Image (cartoon, helix red, strand yellow):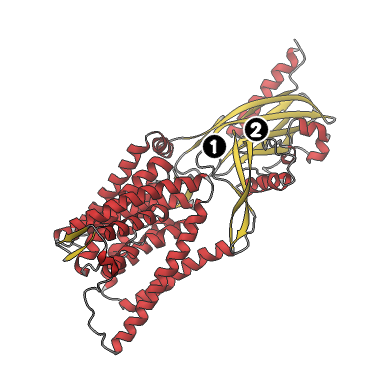
């Protein structure tokens, strides 16, 4: 069954979109990842213009993160103060990102930038996942030594120190501001929540306890992707509500299945599988960038200036 | 059945003019089976029948042109191992859609100057590159424009020929793909005899988005802030209600 997407301005097979949403949702439920970094490239492969894929995926992440924020909030797993500092950075970063997005689109380079960003990040994320799997397998054989909560480095000498009671931290506000900013830019340009960058940054860079990391990162993701959705809709008109609705529908069902089956599957092998999948998607995007194109010419998207 | 009825109507219309004999009879009468194509949510393309009658034997050429707009053609170039967009050409007033249906191959239809004057055939389409027509790269970019539009199915090369029924009635079926741009189209019908145009008639054809999809598109562009807010609100509602529904599963 084909449905016409009003903003993407193409007809797509509903079942294909639903299946993609469900598959990515399944992985999200299984691993607690947002899945934006898989969904956006899949949408591009399905023929959705990259700009619309990014804007719409941000909208979908609003839907997929809201319930998580509530759940973690109830359990007191959100460091609101830390979340707000991250958000300030996130708002600045995502606003700058959307502006940059419009600029790149006007000069016809946005598709390229999106693809390159994905090649880099999928390579890193997929590589880290496989590394993590290898480490888990190794750790099962010998016990890992106890690690300190965090090491003190020059980062702790930065000014504007603030006490984050919930995270048991006394660090410079510049650190979370920077993390929030960087993730905000990524959210705007790549249409991802940025959890896969933010969670490690919160643990290793800020030294936050893992108990509040997920809740606080979801808190930041919810508001930053809402900001991206609004600004993309305002400046670039790249948010497709119809496409978003199908993605949410598939994603919700998939996430529930993922949570249900999550306990029955070997986590480390599933992670290896996901890592391989991520690298495969990245490799496909990379190949498209370096392979000699079939046609040297492209018809421009003059950014709605027709 | 409907098409047949329309054809008969055309025949009658032509027939009424001919015996009237007040002035010279119209050499060509033509019309479309529909003057409006509505792009609805389930739109997968459409076909329009161009039909009419002539006052005798001759050749017929049907040209369908979409609304004109600016197109940018960019050439990829290799930089640091990857292919990026480099040089570009802007073409002004390119028809968003263009197709020709004829009774004969173009070269048998008329001489080159006649074809060029009426822009019959893709190779006779005038492309305005804003004064860069003498640029050595112009031809490569102009060819690329036509090739790319063809690959998007917007410059279909053969949409079926013009068929004559008897020697006065003709019909041609013009296909429009699912991605056909909206706007006001012009359907021109030429009657040619001995390589000269002896009759011409044109009719407008409107292609517009109708229904929910069109409303959403307009809304997203006219009231962008409200559209953005609604997109967020819908996501919030969908996300929370899904979580509520699956709470006990």
Q: Residue furthest bottom?
A: A141
Which of the 4 image quadrants contains residue B112? top right
Q: Nearer the viewer, mark 2 or mark 1?
A: 1
Count neighbours of disc 1 (C-alpha within 10 A) and say few if under 14, some if 14 to 19, many if 20 or more.
few
Per the image, the residue denoted by label 2 is B50
Q: Position of residue B158 (x, y in %)?
A: 69, 44
**Which structural element holds mark 2?**
strand
For residue A285, side relative to residue A254 (left or right): right
Q: Residue furthest right?
A: B194
Subunit bearing disc 2: B
Residue displayed at 67% across by 45% down = B146
Q: Quadrant of the N terminus of chain B?
A: top right
Per the image, the residue denoted by label 1 is A306
Residue displayed at 38% across by 73% down = A128
Which of the 4 image quadrants contains residue A79? bottom left
As drawn, A67 above or below B153: below
**Which structural element holds mark 1?**
loop
Q: Residue furthest top?
A: B22
Q: Position of residue B62 (x, y in %)?
A: 70, 33
Which of the 4 image quadrants contains residue B248? bottom left
Find residue A28 and name its label. none
As drawn, A237 above or below A84: above
Residue displayed at 82% across by 40% down = B107
- Depth check: give the residue in front, A260 or A294: A294
Q: CA distance from mark 2 to mark 1?
A: 29 Å
Count neighbours of disc 2 (C-alpha within 10 A) and say few if under 14, some if 14 to 19, many if 20 or more.
many
- Are the residues at dot 2 and dot 1 in contact (C-beta closer than 8 Å)? no
For residue B40, side relative to residue B156 (left or right): left
- The reply to the same-chain question for discs 2 and 1 is no
For residue A159, side relative to residue B94 (left or right): left
- Depth check: give the residue in front, A166 or B158: A166
């Amino acid at each position: 069954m084909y449905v016409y997407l009003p903003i993407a301005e193409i007809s797509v097979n509903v079942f294909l979109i639903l299946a993609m949403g469900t598959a990515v949702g399944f992985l999200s439920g299984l691993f607690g990842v947002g899945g934006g970094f898989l969904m956006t490239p899949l949408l591009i492969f399905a023929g959705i213009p990259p700009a619309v894929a990014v804007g719409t995926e941000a909208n979908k992440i609003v839907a997929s993160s809201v319930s998580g924020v509530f759940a973690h909030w109830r359990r007191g797993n959100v460091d609101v103060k830390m979340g707000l500092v991250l958000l300030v950075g996130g708002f600045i970063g995502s606003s700058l990102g959307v502006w940059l997005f419009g600029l790149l689109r006007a000069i016809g380079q946005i598709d390229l930038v999106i693809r390159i960003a994905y090649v880099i990040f999928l390579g890193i994320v997929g590589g880290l996942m496989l590394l993590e799997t290898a480490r888990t397998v190794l750790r099962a054989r010998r016990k890992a030594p106890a690690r300190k909560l965090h090491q003190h480095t020059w980062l702790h000498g930065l000014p504007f120190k603030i006490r984050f009671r919930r995270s048991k931290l006394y660090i410079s506000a510049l650190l979370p501001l920077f993390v929030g900013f960087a993730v905000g830019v990524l959210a705007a340009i790549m249409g991802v929540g940025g959890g896969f960058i933010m969670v490690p940054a919160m643990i290793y860079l800020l030294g936050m306890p893992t108990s509040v990391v997920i809740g606080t990162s979801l808190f930041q993701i919810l508001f930053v992707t809402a900001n991206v959705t609004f600004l993309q809709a305002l400046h670039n008109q790249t948010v497709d509500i119809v496409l978003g609705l199908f993605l949410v529908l598939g994603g919700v069902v998939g996430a529930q299945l993922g949570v249900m089956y999550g306990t029955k599957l070997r986590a480390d092998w599933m992670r290896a599988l996901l890592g391989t999948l991520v690298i495969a998607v990245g490799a496909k995007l990379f190949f498209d960038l370096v392979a000699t194109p079939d046609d040297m010419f492209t018809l421009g998207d003059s950014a709605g200036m027709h | 059945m409907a098409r047949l009825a329309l054809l008969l109507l055309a025949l009658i219309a032509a027939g009424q003019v001919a015996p009237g004999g007040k002035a010279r009879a119209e050499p060509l009468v033509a019309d479309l089976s529909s003057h409006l194509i509505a792009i609805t949510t389930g739109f997968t393309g459409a076909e329009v029948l161009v039909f009419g009658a002539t006052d005798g034997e001759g050749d017929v050429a049907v040209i369908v042109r979409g609304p004109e707009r600016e197109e940018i053609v960019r050439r990829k170039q290799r930089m640091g191992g990857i292919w990026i967009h480099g040089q570009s050409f802007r073409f002004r007033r390119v028809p968003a859609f263009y197709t020709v249906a004829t009774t004969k191959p173009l070269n048998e239809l008329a001489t080159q100057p006649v074809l060029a004057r009426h822009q019959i055939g893709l190779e006779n389409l005038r492309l305005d590159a804003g004064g860069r027509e003498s640029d050595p790269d112009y031809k490569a970019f102009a060819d690329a424009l036509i090739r790319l539009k063809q690959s998007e199915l917007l410059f279909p090369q053969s949409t079926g020929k013009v068929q004559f029924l008897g020697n006065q009635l003709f019909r041609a079926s013009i296909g429009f793909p699912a991605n056909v741009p909206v706007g006001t189209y012009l359907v021109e019908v030429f009657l040619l005899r001995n390589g000269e145009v002896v009759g011409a008639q044109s009719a407008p054809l409107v292609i517009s988005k109708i229904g929910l999809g069109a409303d959403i598109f307009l809304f997203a562009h006219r009231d962008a802030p409200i559209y953005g807010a609604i997109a967020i609100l819908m996501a919030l509602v969908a996300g929370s209600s899904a979580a509520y529904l699956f709470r006990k599963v």
